[in-house]
Amino acid sequence: MTIEGIRQSEAIDWVYRLFDSDGDLLYVGRTQCNQSRINDHRRAAWGKEITRSTVEIWTGHDAALAREKEIIRLENPRHNRNRYPPRGVPVTFIATPDSVKLAAALGVEARELTEGGTP
């Protein structure tokens, strides 16, 4: 796929990291509109700190979401509000059958939602 094709594809998710001039990780995010989203961060109170960004290109929303959470957990970016617990911390969430695999990849327990809406 060409770069232009990647930019126009709705099936592509971008996982990005924003850094300051010292190379410290400021923020990790996931989007389908990479440049627009980074520009949004530049307008934040801490946006002037951004001097560099990197991106990973993922085909598949669930995979990109798992990667974003993994990076946040491992690299502890300064300005992410949504922190994820380290592996081994007991966390349970209710998931659809498709999400159970994602939960396993994140190292958390998930139970499928039963027909009545309870795990």
Image: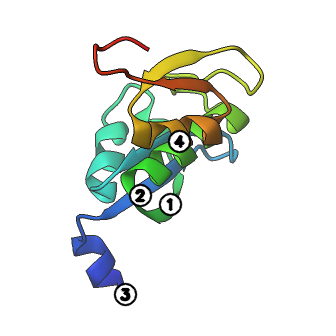
Real-space Cα distance between discs 4 and 3? 26 Å
Q: Nearer the viewer, residue 111 or 92?
A: 111
Q: What element carries label 4?
A: helix
The mark nearer the N terminus, 2 or 3, is: 3
Residue at figure coordinates x 27%, y 56% from the top left: 33
The mark nearer the N terminus, 2 or 1, is: 2
Q: Which residue lies furthest to the right in this view?
A: 88
Q: Which of 108 and 57 is in front in this view?
A: 108
Give the percent coordinates (x, y) of residue 88.
77, 22
Real-space Cα distance between discs 2 and 3? 15 Å
- From this view, report whether residue 31 is shown above or below residue 49: below
Q: Mark 4 points at which residue?
A: 102
| Residue 88 in view (yes/no) | yes
Q: What is the crowding at mark 2: few (fewer than 14 residues within 10 Å), some, or many (at least 20)?
A: many
Foreground disc of the pair 4, 1? 4
Give the percent coordinates (x, y) of residue 22.
70, 44
Q: Name the residue under label 3.
A: 1
Q: In which quarter of the image is residue 95?
A: top left
The mark nearer the N terminus, 3 or 1, is: 3
Q: Name the residue under label 2.
A: 14
Left or right: 74 as drawn, with respect to 56: right
Foreground disc of the pair 2, 4? 4
